[in-house]
Amino acid sequence: MSEPDPILVVSDLNVSLASGKRMTPILREVSFALRPGEILGIVGESGSGKSLTASAIMGLLEPPVRIVSGAVAFKGRDLAALDEKAVRAIRGNEIAMVFQDPAMSLNPLLRIETQMVESIVAHDRGCSRHAARERARAALETVGVPAAAKRLRAYPHELSGGMRQRVSIAIAMLHSPAVIIADEPTTALDVTIQAQILDEMTQLCRKNGTALIWISHDLSLLSSFADRICVMYAGRVIESGPCGEVIGAPRHPYSRGLILSVPAMARAGKDIEPIPGYPPRVGMVPSGCAFRPRCHRASPACAVQPPLQTVASQQSAACFHPFDDKLQVPA
Amino acid sequence: MIEQTDTAALTLPPNPARRPVYEDLLDFLRDPVAAVAAFVFLVIIMLAIAAPWIAPQNPYDLASLNILNSGLPPGSSSLTGGVYLLGTDSQGRDLLSAMLYGLGISLAVPFASVLIALVVGVTVGLVAAYSGGRLDTLLMRLVDFQLGFPPVLLALVILAVSGPGLGKTTLALATAYWAVFARLVRGAAQSERQKEYVVAARCLAIPAHRIMFRHILPNVISPLIVVGALEWGACVSLEATLSFLGLGSPITRPSLGMLIANGLSYIMAGRYWVSIYPGILLMSVVLCINILGDRLRECLNPRFKA
Amino acid sequence: MTMQISATAIVKRYGSQPGPLTRLAGRLNFTVEPKLVQALNGVSIDVRPGEVLGIVGESGCGKSTLGRVLAGLESPDEGSLTYEGRTLAELDRRERKTVQLASQVIFQDPWASLNPRWRIRQIIGEAPLVHGLVERRDLARHVTAMLTQVGLTEDYLDRFPHELSGGQRQRVGIARALAVSPRTLICDESVSALDVSIQAQILRLFRRLRNDLGISLVFISHDLSVVHNLSDRIAVMYLGRIVEIGTAQQIYEAPSHPYTQALIADAPRLSTQRRSFSVIRGELPSPYAPPSGCAFHTRCPKAFERCRLDVPATIATEPGRTVACHLYEEATIPA
C-alpha cells in the first residue's frame, strides 16, 4: 500500500517570543506531516507548545510571538510565505479550527442561523439565503444537533456547552475543509457529552476524508481514536509515531512517564508512578535535552539536544537513551 | 519512593527577582503627559507646603494690608517697596501670597475628605458585601439614596445649614463622596468573596472582620486608589465651587475658589488678574490630579498594559 | 463504628421561590425561567474514619454542593448532619469551631485558592495562630513542618503564590489545610486543573497523607479514573441524587446503575487500540427542570414506563452497596 502524499507538512518550525532585543524560543524545530484523512493527536502538558503549534499553522500568532524559521506547507504551498489575503482564503475554508471555548468562534449577539448563513453566502456567492439556511440545518444535523431547525433560531447563550461546541464544529465543517485543527475541543465538557462529540467528529472526518489534528493534554482520550501521536515537551516534539506504538512501547522517558501517570495505569489502590519535578517555564528551558533534570536515565551526553531520530519503523524519539521494551497497557 | 517525590518537589523554580519600586515609578512616568503632570503637581505641592516661607506677605495678617494697595495690576510696586508679582485684590492683599496660602487649603481639605470618605465607604462596602442578606440590602439602599443626590447639592445643603468652615467643609465633602467608595468596594468585594481563597478562610474559621480587612481589602485596593485619586480631583473642584459660593472656606482663610469669586466683580472693570490667576492655578491642580489618576489606572490595570 | 461525618437525607436548594410578579407572568403565559434549583435532593452518605470516599458525577449533579455541605460551608435546608456522632446543635461555640476545623477543603483552582497578596508563611500560618493552636514563636517551625509534609521546603516560606507553579500551589493549599490538624479533607476537583504528571504527584501525596495521618478523604471529581485510583468507596451522583454507592472495585468492575455503566464506558481509557464511545445519547437535563420520576430516564437505554413516574428508592443489593434504580427493585422482590 502506498502512502498518499501529506496534505500538511510542518518542517523545522521555530517560534519565538520577542521582548526588546531578546528572543525567547517557545517552539523549536517542530516537524510533522499530516496525510489526508489521518487523525493526528498532539499531546503535551501546559507550556509544551501544543496550542501554539495550532496557532502557528493557522497564522494566528500575534506579535510579540512570531515564526523565526521553518515552513508550514499546505498542499505544497508555504503558508508563511503567502500574503495575508491568500492565507485568509485558506483559513476557515480549507483549514478550519475548533477551539476549547466555543465562544471563540461564535458571536454572542447573533443567532446561530445568521452566523452560519453569512459564512455560507460569503464563501459561495451563488447560494441563495434559503438554500444556505437548508445547508446550515443539514450541517447541524450531521453533528448530532437535535431539532436543528429550532436551534438555528437560538442565540449561542441559549444552548448548553455541548450544543455550542457542536455548532462550532458544524461551522468549522461547513466548507468541507481538508484539515481541521481541534484544540482541546471537549476538555470543558462532561464525559458522556465528550464521548458523543468525539464519536460524531471522528466518524465525520473518516467519512469525508478530512484530516484532523486533535490537541489534548489527555493521553488516554487520544489513545482511543488517534492514528498517530506527537508528544510535545517544552516546545519540542520529543516522540511521534503510530498510536499503538507510542502508547504500547513509548521510547522517550517523558512519554513513558506521561503514560505511567495516567491513573488507570495503576491498579486501583496502588500508587501512580509520577514524573518527578515540574515542567520548565517558558524562557527557563534547560539547555540540551529539556527533560534532563527530571529524567532518571539522563547522562552527561544529554547536555546536547538529542535530534528526533527514527527508533522503529515509523516511530521516532528525541532521546539518547530510549527505552526499547513494551509497556503493559490494557487493550 | 516517598523520598523521590519529596526531593522532586524541592526544585523551586528560579524566579525573577521582585521588581524594585523605582521600576514601577519609571513605568508610570514613561507616558510623557503623565511625566509633565507629575512634575507640575510636585511643584504645586511644594509651593503649597512652603507657602509660609516663600510668600512675600502673610495674607491672614490683616494688619499688613493697606487699602491704598488695592487693585494694583501685576508687577506694581507696593507702598513699602516690594513688588506685587501678580497684583493685589480689592483689599490690597498680595495675590501671589493669597494664592499660595489658598492652594494649601484647596488641596488639603479635599484630601482629608476623600480619606474620610474612603474609610467610611470601604467599611460600609465590605460589611455589605460580606454579610449579604438584609444588611446588604439596607446599606446599599442607603448608598443608592445618597447617590441619587448630586454631590454639589448635598454639600450645599449641609453647609447652608451648618455655615462655612474648614472642618465643616471637609465633612460635607466626605458625606458627598463616601457612597461612591461604598458601591465600588462592595462590587469588588462581592466578586472577591466567591474566590476560593476566601472560601478557604471561612472553612478555616477565620473571624469575619479578619477576612474582610486582611483578606478581601488588600485585593480590592488598587481600583480604590485610582478612584480615590480621581475623586480627589473632583473634590478639589467641588470645594472650589462651594467656596466660590461663599459656603466653603471662611473669608479669613480664602481658598482658590473664594479668591476667584472675590475677583469676579472686578473682571469687567479691567482687573482681570484677581480671578484669572487663581483660576489658572485651580485648573492646573485638577488637570494634574486627573491625568495622574488616569495614568495610575493604566498602570494598575493589567488589561491596559502591553 | 462512629462515622467521621454522617449526612442523612440532605436537601439543598439554591435560588428563590417565584415571587408574585413571576407567578403572574407565568399565569399570563409568558415564558418564565425557573429560578429554583434543587442541588441536593435527599442525599445520605457516611464518611468513615480513615477512608477515601470518591464522589463522581457530571456538572450540575450536586457533588460540589455536597462537598460544601460536608465541609460545613453551606447549611442544608433539610436533613441532618452529624460529626463523630454529634449534631451541631448539641455543641457549644468552642466545640463548633473544633468541628469546623476538623473538615478542610482542598480546592480545584490552585490560582484562585491562595491569597495573591500574602506570603506562603502567612497563608499557612494564619489559621493556627488565630485559633491559638500554635504559639507565635513556634509558628515558623509549624509552618515548615507542614511544608515538609507536602513535599516542599522552608525555601518557600517567603514566596508569594504567583512565584509558584500550579502543582506547588496545590501543595501549599494542602499544607494550609493540614496546619489545623483536620480529620477529613474534602478534595473538590483538587487535581482537575493540574497537568497529568503533576496530577499523579498530588494523588500520591493524598494517598500518603491518608496512610500516615489516618485522615479521611472525600474525593470529588468528574474523572472516574482518578477517583477509582484513590478511593475505597465510590458514590455516583446524578442531578442531585446519589444513584449508586459501592466499593471502588464493585463500581468499576460491575457497575449496577445504567448511568454508572455509561460513565465507565465513556471515560477515556488508555489503550493501544481504537474503540468506540457513546453508549448514552442526549443532553444533561437542566437542573432547573429535572425530569419526573428517575432523573436519568430521559437518557437511559433501559428505561421503562415506571421510570418516568416513580422516583426509585435506594436499596441495598449487597452488603455495603446501594443502588437507586427500578431494575433492581424488581429483582429484590421475593418470588
Image: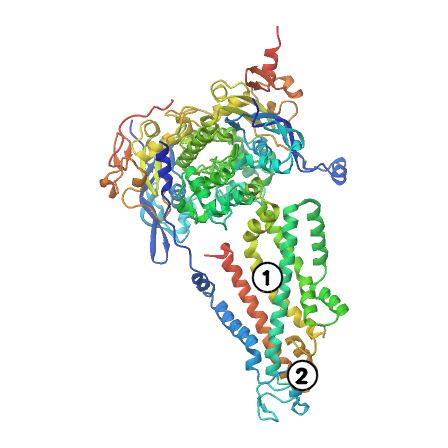
Residue at the extreme left: A301
The alpha-carbon separation of the residues under discs 2 and 1 comes to: 35 Å
Instruction: Indicate left or right for A189 with B184 as reference.
Output: left
What residue is rendered at 54% in x and 74% in y?
B44
Note whether B131 is above or below B151 in the view shown.
above
x, y percentage for residue A152? 58, 37
Please give the chain letter of the residue carrying mark 2: B
x, y percentage for residue C86? 62, 28
x, y percentage for residue B95? 62, 83
Please give the chain letter of the residue carrying mark 1: B
Local crowd size for mark 2, using a 10 Å CA cut-off: few (<14), some (14–19), many (≥20): some
Which residue in the structure is indicated by mark 1?
B228
Which residue in the structure is indicated by mark 2?
B267
Instruction: Indicate left or right for A115 with A294 as reference.
Output: right
Image coloring type: rainbow
Disc 2 on helix, strand or loop? helix
Q: Quadrant of the N terminus of chain B?
A: top left
